Image: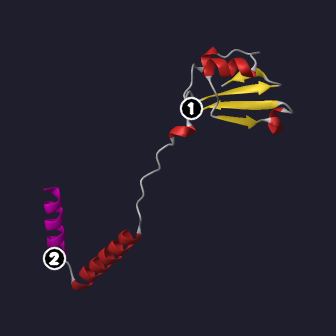
Amino acid sequence: MIWLAVAAGAVWLALTMTRSRRLMLIGSAVLAAAWLAQVEVKPAPAAKASMITKQKGSCASVAEGMTIAEVKRRVGEPDEVRADEETRGPGAKMLVYRGSRCVVHLFEERVELVE
C-alpha cells in the first residue's frame, strides 16, 4: 500500500514539474537503475563452524603459573596459537580462544596473564 502512495506521489510530481526537470529526473532514474543492475549483492559469509572450536571450560579456570597442558585440559584446544616473541621476548606465546573471547599469554610454557 505504501508503494502505491509513493508511486502516485512520483507521478504527480513528474506531471507538475517543468520539462527540463522531468528529463533530469528520468535520466537520474535510468542511471540509478543501470547502477543497481550492475551491483551484485552477496550475503555475508557465515562463520565457519571449524573456525571456533568447542571448549570444555572457561578462561576463568586458568590461573597464573599453569602449564600449557593444564590450560588445554581445563579449557580445551585453542582456536589459534600465536607467537608473541616480538612484543614479550623469546618463548612468549598467546593461546586465543574465540568462543570465550579470551587470550592466555604464556611465557616459557607457563601462564603469565589471562585477558
Q: Position of residue 14 (x, y in %)?
A: 19, 75
Amino acid type of disc 2? Thr
Q: Compared with residue 33, is residue 48 higher up or lower down, i.e. above or below?
A: above
Q: Nearer the viewer, mark 2 or mark 1?
A: 1
The residue wearing badge 2 is 16
Tell me where residue 5 sits by quadrant.
bottom left
Q: Nearer the viewer, residue 15 or 38?
A: 38
Q: Compared with residue 43, is residue 91 higher up or lower down, i.e. above or below?
A: above
Tell me where residue 42 sits by quadrant.
bottom left
The span shown in magenta is 1-15
Q: Residue at x 22, y 85 (%)?
A: 19
Q: Residue at x 85, y 33 (%)?
A: 89
Q: Position of residue 32 (x, y in %)?
A: 34, 72
Decide whether the magenta segment is chiefly helix, strand or loop.
Answer: helix
Dot 2 or dot 1: first in sequence order is: 2
The residue wearing badge 1 is 53
Amino acid type of disc 1? Thr
